[in-house]
Amino acid sequence: MNYKATIEEENKEIAKRYKNLLKETYQTLSRSDKLMIRKAFNLSVEAHSNQRRKTGEPYIFHPISVAKIVANEIGLGATSIAAALLHDVVEDTKYTLDDIERLFGETVARIVSGLTKISSLKKDKDHSIQAENFRKMLLTLHDDVRVILIKVADRLHNMQTMDAMPAYKQVKIASETLYIYAPLAHRLGLYNIKTELEDLGLKYTEPEVYNDILSKISESKEDQENYIKSFENTLNSGLSKESFKYQIKGRFKSIYSIRRKMRKQNVSFDEVYDKFAIRIIYDPSSKDEKFDAWKIYSIVTDYFKPNPSRLRDWISQPKSTGYEALHITVVGPEAKWVEVQIRSNRMDEIAEKGYAAHFKYKQGIESDNGLEGWLNRLKETLENQSINAIDFVEDFKLNLYAKEIYVFTPNGDLKSLPKGASALDFAFSIHTDVGLKCRGVKVNGKLVPLSFELSSGDQIEVITTSSNKPNARWLDFVITARARTKIKTALKEQEKKIAEEGKAILARKLRHLKINFNEKSLNELVVFFKLKTSFDLFFRIGNGAIDNTQLKNFVSQRNNTIVNFFKKRLTRAPSKELINKEEVSTKYDDLVFGIEEEKLDYTTSKCCKPIPGDKVFGFITINEGIKIHKKDCPNSISMQSNYAYRVIKAKWIDSTNQEFKAILKVSGEDNRGIVNNLTKIISNNMDVFIHSINIAGNEGIFDGKLSISVKNRTQLNKLIEKIKKVEGVKKVQRVNTM
């Protein structure tokens, strides 16, 4: 791309773009607003005066364009426009955040800070700068949603002007856009921007597919216009008779959504039956917008036959993005299926501009439904900043694109949840404490497992108990970011308690073995057991994964001076920083299969080469046993769709945290409350789960069996000793069968 312009021409163009920015603002600007924007513009021009974009254009073109998207397409006010003009100043020029705060105040500085990337991190394999930048940006939702909105605008303009970049960068930025920025725009109600981001993302990730669909849409443009005219002419008399003021717009579905339909349905472009949508946008003829929408629906279905399974009422129950409309699919002219969207001017404005842009800063109204509710719940989720950045972004993303279901509380209140949400997700959506103390759930009056997948219309009642504790298994079936974050936080607290106990046990045992409990011996133990941190060590001693025998092996090796000499030469002790980390590092070293988490023989596939920690599944082959594939393996779709019966659930685990099933036979005197006392003992032991209890009483004595899950033999022995102390229990022994 050859850019040629004189300094004079550039200055004229900059002035012209600035005037257009002010002219095309969505909100009305006061004199003080204009002064602040002018001040921000002047600073940005001066700061970026020596910078050029890859195209050769002056860099200032970019901040002006971003500010224009923010002002016009998203509909934000003066503070956001000024921040958009300044968004790259701290990152790329001599100006600091202190300078921005001094000149423009704390609010603008905070927004600019949220938009400034992290330039470097400590060299650590566990860190991803990309993920950390996402996390930093997302955490600003705590304070100000405007940071995210400006970032989406910034990303849109970068995507619009990416042609001058090398191909590998184009693919990286486009993939990142499809992964998080398009879903973010969708969730924030920015439908036009979301569509453009998706289309541009496809343009750079699959250029041939993009260009093919684009050319086919262009070819059929005239046919589309004629079709819309035919549709409008048919409806005209019916709508005019009811004195509706309306306009009918038609548009092709986005290139990305057509591509998605082609993939999902495995059809060609010509076989996608609802390629375009028609919008009827009306001025309400009464105070009741909803009544008018259904009236228009009635008129449309008088002329065109509807598909009843494709009716979507987003007016009675708006989407959590704030979106409102009535969607119907009808057999239109020429017997073609066409989607019709019915919405008022107000609904259209919210859909076009994004409810997020003006619900709070323009109207100052807060409620707990729609987007406001989602943002409030999200802020709570974001409180936990301690989890790994990649996990953080993954958890956050779960809630972005998910389709919604609507369920009821026992009082009849409506709750929206992502499709695929479990009964436990619902418990956490009520309150964190309700989720953490959830013992059981009733759906439509019937007791169901916590993993039960909810459907629209379900009525749910949560049963809680103060003694209940979350466990790691819960993470296998919760899908909402809030539930996952709260469970992880609670598990970390449990780990800390176990580690504290383990530290005290280790100090006691080392004293017994005549070894000093100090940093040097801890370092040696961490190296010996191939761990990363001292916290790992304490935790594994606390849960019994490292027992007396293993500690004695350490002592004997430590005392072997020759072996010890060479070991010291060959192994390097972990750094102090690493040793003192308060987290259990997971070392995925084992693979388990099915619901029972059995160990089976397997080989890894050559097509996707999975490694420990990857999300995987097993595929039972005819001649080669079980083959392990990554979930995003290129062959996974064909295997899942054609041979679902041969697919087996699989996951990587840390063998030190693996659970084992054990059966205990218990007998003794039949005292009142014996079952209650037994279950209390088991449930109060961390990470011990009851599978089944079978106890029978006969003339003053009882006999029974308990099926439980434990981490290791040490934990089981401790539990047996505690059960023996229960009043009435005479004998406890381990057996093989129920």
Image: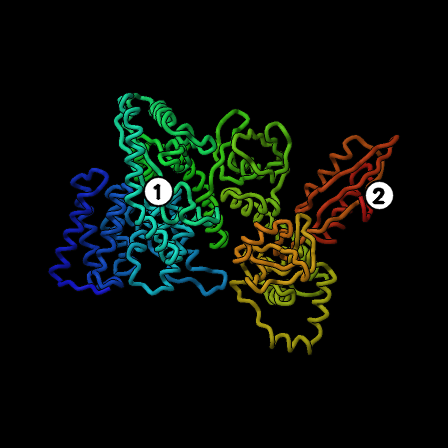
Mark identifier at residue 731: 2
* Quarter holding residue 340: top left
Q: Residue at x 15, y 62 (%)?
A: 5
User: Would residue 364 be visible to someone looking at this image?
Assistant: no
Eyeballing the image, is 7 above or below 484? Answer: below
**Residue 411: x %, y % from top left:** 52, 24
The reply to whether dot 2 and dot 1 touch (C-beta < 8 Å) is no
For mark 2, give the secondary structure: strand
Towards the viewer: 246 or 374 = 246
For mark 1, give the secondary structure: helix
**Residue 172: x %, y % from top left:** 39, 60
- Residue at the far right: name it: 699
Eyeballing the image, is 506 above or below 566? Answer: above
* Quarter holding residue 565: bottom right
- Give the residue pinned by disc 1: 191
**Residue 238: x %, y % from top left:** 30, 24
Towards the viewer: 411 or 277 = 277
Q: CA distance from mark 2 to mark 1?
A: 67 Å
Q: What kind of residue is marked 1?
A: Tyr
Towards the viewer: 700 or 254 = 254
Q: Residue at x 37, y 61 (%)?
A: 119
